[in-house]
């Protein structure tokens, strides 16, 4: 008996010593809460479909069921604090989750993700299979956590490091995922799979934090997201709004974006440079030589980490590896081409360039970086937009001067032939279309007319279904659409305005004031909801945050490949 007592005393002493010497893994790692935003789910929730998603988190859905699960702010089940993120459905199979890419820096603290270091994310999850009153049933709703080591945003990427599936029911479980970073950002994925519905199946997420393994403990208490009010309702979000203005090079025009890193590229036509802008809170600008004269537009291929720049004055396209900030090629389009709009079909690694002075579109093979052929179009081709779902390329034609009776040329990317001309003379005798954008989710095409109308085209029939004048009389210039919110952003040719068209309710929702200029560029990052607009006369870009009603961001993998 004395030996047993002595053993118990020694065991308690050892436990006490370990508690003092090893205060826990969370204390040994440097917390990086400032890089993963709203991880406690005590901050804002944004409208999403018929529910709400925590701000800074992006929902995704593998389309297992007939419709998406509902996302909600829950106060019923939470690990700590006042709220958690809930996904649920009633008698419907589903497979969905949320993701977030870490910000570049945390602002004042200077914390950042560094390649070559290991990081761990901790996530509390909870599930209820069959409703609150049902019996305990494990391994029905499966949960897991994954990390992309370089900030990739495709949940189906083979580079994601996933934890095993966890199937505990009616019990809060902490899932810990670890990875060695290979870049300056990480993307965290939390998802659940409910392949056989038991009724009102529910999944809850709470208490997410990130830490660097092996780093010294923090010198101060990590910043906690402010607690919401006592009313268990989502905090109202601000309307779509202008955030700030950022100086860039001279006469900025076209803009492209690398979504996973929230990095934008601006063609500075007046000084033959490209401005690279990145940073969630503190935007940082670096400039690269454009490799040609009068760069007008850029196109980004995120899969290949490439940027293509159309240089109007030198009849060329320069190719950059934007991951290394290096020019890797220059493609001659032929004298007198005057390239303008440019776009990439990533599923076939093909680049399309509007030769405004040659009335054609150059088709470039992204593997060999040579021009395969030129497709004839209408007079003065301007801008290009591509729908990777339908493999259609839309090219606006400003029309012959002085009449400027414009049209839209539709190219079949399978055969590389122009199979249809969408005439706009019935909409406006002097239409002069400029910007064009496609929402691949809704299969709608939007064309901005200098005469002052937004033309809406059904992408299935390729017919005009509507033409709407802006809320303030003005010509229209550039256009871009956010597929996550179905908001269409259109710049005016006078008055320094950007109009926002809510395509869900089919009406104009807002008018924003931006800088001065004509022949702008607009680019949208649907992952961060940032919208950038170039102001050529002010040598600036305007940053807009799109906080509209988010629609389900369905995953789609186009099946069309290069012939």
Image: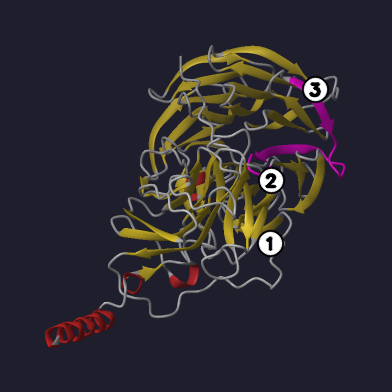
- Residue visible at 30% across and 74% down in the picture: 216
Q: Nearer the viewer, residue 38 or 173?
A: 173
Q: Earlier in the sequence, mark 3 or mark 2?
A: 2
Q: Nearer the viewer, residue 299 or 345?
A: 345
Find residue 14 and report its horizontal and vertical position in percent: 20, 81
Which SS class for mark 3? loop
- Residue visible at 46% across and 67% down in the picture: 33
Q: Nearer the viewer, mark 3 or mark 2?
A: 2
Instruction: Name the side, left or right, on which 367 lies relative to 433.
Output: left
Which SS class for mark 1? loop
Q: Is residue 483 magenta?
A: yes
Give the crowd class for mark 3: few <14, some 14-19, many >=20 residues within 10 Å. Answer: few
Q: Nearer the viewer, residue 375 or 290?
A: 375
Residue 251 visible in the displayed image: no
- Distance from Cα at disc 3 to Cα at disc 2: 46 Å
Which SS class for mark 2? loop
Q: Is residue 136 magenta?
A: no
Instruction: Name the side, left or right, on which 142 lies relative to 338.
Output: left
- Farthest residue in the left direction? 3
**Quadrant of the snapshot with the N terminus:** bottom left
Q: Are marks 3 and 2 in contact (CB under 8 Å)?
A: no
Q: Which residue is mark 3?
A: 402
- Location of residue 273 with respect to 3 vertically, above or below: above
Residue 99 visible in the displayed image: yes
Q: Which residue is mark 1?
A: 234
Instruction: Name the side, left or right, on which 283 lies relative to 25.
Output: right
Magenta-colored span: 463-485
Find residue 66 and report its horizontal and vertical position in percent: 62, 33
Q: Earlier in the sequence, mark 3 or mark 1?
A: 1
Q: Which residue is mark 2?
A: 49
Query: How many discs appear?
Result: 3
Give the crowd class for mark 2: few <14, some 14-19, many >=20 residues within 10 Å. Answer: some
């Amino acid at each position: 008996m004395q030996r047993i007592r002595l053993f118990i005393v020694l065991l308690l002493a050892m436990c006490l010593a370990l508690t003092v010497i090893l205060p826990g893994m969370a204390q040994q790692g440097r917390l990086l809460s400032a890089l993963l935003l709203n991880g406690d789910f005590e901050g804002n929730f944004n409208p999403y479909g018929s529910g709400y998603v925590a701000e800074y988190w992006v929902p995704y859905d593998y389309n297992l069921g007939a419709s998406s699960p509902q996302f909600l702010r829950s106060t019923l089940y939470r690990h700590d604090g006042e709220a958690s993120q809930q996904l649920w459905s009633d008698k419907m199979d589903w497979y969905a989750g949320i993701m977030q890419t870490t910000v570049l820096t945390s602002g004042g603290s200077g914390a950042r993700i560094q390649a070559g270091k290991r990081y761990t994310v901790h996530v509390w999850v909870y599930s209820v299979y069959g409703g609150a009153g049902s019996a305990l049933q494990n391994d029905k709703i499966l949960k897991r956590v994954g990390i992309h080591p370089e900030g990739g945003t495709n949940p189906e990427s083979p580079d994601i490091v996933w934890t095993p599936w966890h199937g505990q029911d009616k019990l809060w479980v902490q899932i810990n995922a670890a990875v060695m970073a290979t870049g300056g950002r990480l993307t965290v994925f939390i998802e659940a799979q409910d392949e056989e519905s038991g009724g009102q199946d529910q999944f809850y997420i709470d208490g997410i934090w990130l830490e660097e393994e092996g780093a010294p403990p923090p010198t101060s208490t990590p910043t906690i997201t402010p607690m919401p009010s006592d009313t268990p309702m989502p905090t109202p979000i601000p309307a779509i709004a202008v955030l700030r203005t950022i100086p860039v090079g001279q006469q900025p025009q076209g803009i492209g974006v690398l979504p996973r890193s929230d990095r934008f590229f601006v063609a500075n036509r007046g000084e033959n440079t490209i401005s690279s802008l990145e940073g969630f809170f503190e935007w940082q600008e670096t400039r690269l030589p454009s490799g040609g004269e009068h760069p007008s537009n850029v196109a980004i291929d995120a899969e290949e980490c490439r940027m293509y720049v159309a240089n109007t004055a030198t009849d060329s396209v320069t190719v950059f590896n934007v991951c290394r900030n290096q020019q890797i090629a220059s493609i001659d389009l032929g004298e007198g081409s005057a390239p303008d709009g440019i776009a990439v079909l990533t599923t076939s690694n093909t680049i399309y360039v509007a030769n405004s002075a040659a009335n054609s579109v150059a088709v470039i093979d992204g593997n060999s970086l040579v021009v395969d052929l030129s497709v004839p179009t209408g007079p003065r081709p301007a801008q290009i937009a591509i729908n990777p779902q339908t493999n259609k390329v839309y090219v606006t034609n400003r029309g012959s001067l002085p009449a400027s009776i414009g049209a839209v040329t539709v190219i079949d990317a399978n055969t590389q032939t122009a199979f249809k001309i969408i005439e706009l003379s019935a909409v406006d005798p002097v239409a002069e279309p400029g910007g064009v954008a496609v929402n691949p989710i809704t299969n709608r095409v939007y064309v901005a007319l200098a005469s002052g109308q937004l033309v809406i085209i059904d992408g299935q029939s390729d017919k005009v279904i509507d033409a709407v004048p802006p809320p303030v009389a003005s010509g229209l210039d550039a256009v871009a659409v956010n597929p996550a919110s179905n908001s269409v952003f259109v710049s005016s040719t006078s008055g320094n305005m950007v109009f926002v068209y809510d395509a869900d309710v089919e009406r104009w929702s807002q008018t924003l004031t931006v800088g001065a200029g004509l022949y702008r560029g607009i680019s949208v990052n649907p992952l961060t909801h940032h919208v950038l607009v170039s102001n050529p006369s002010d040598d600036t870009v305007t940053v807009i945050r799109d906080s509209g009603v988010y629609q389900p961001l369905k995953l789609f993998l186009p099946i069309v490949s290069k012939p």
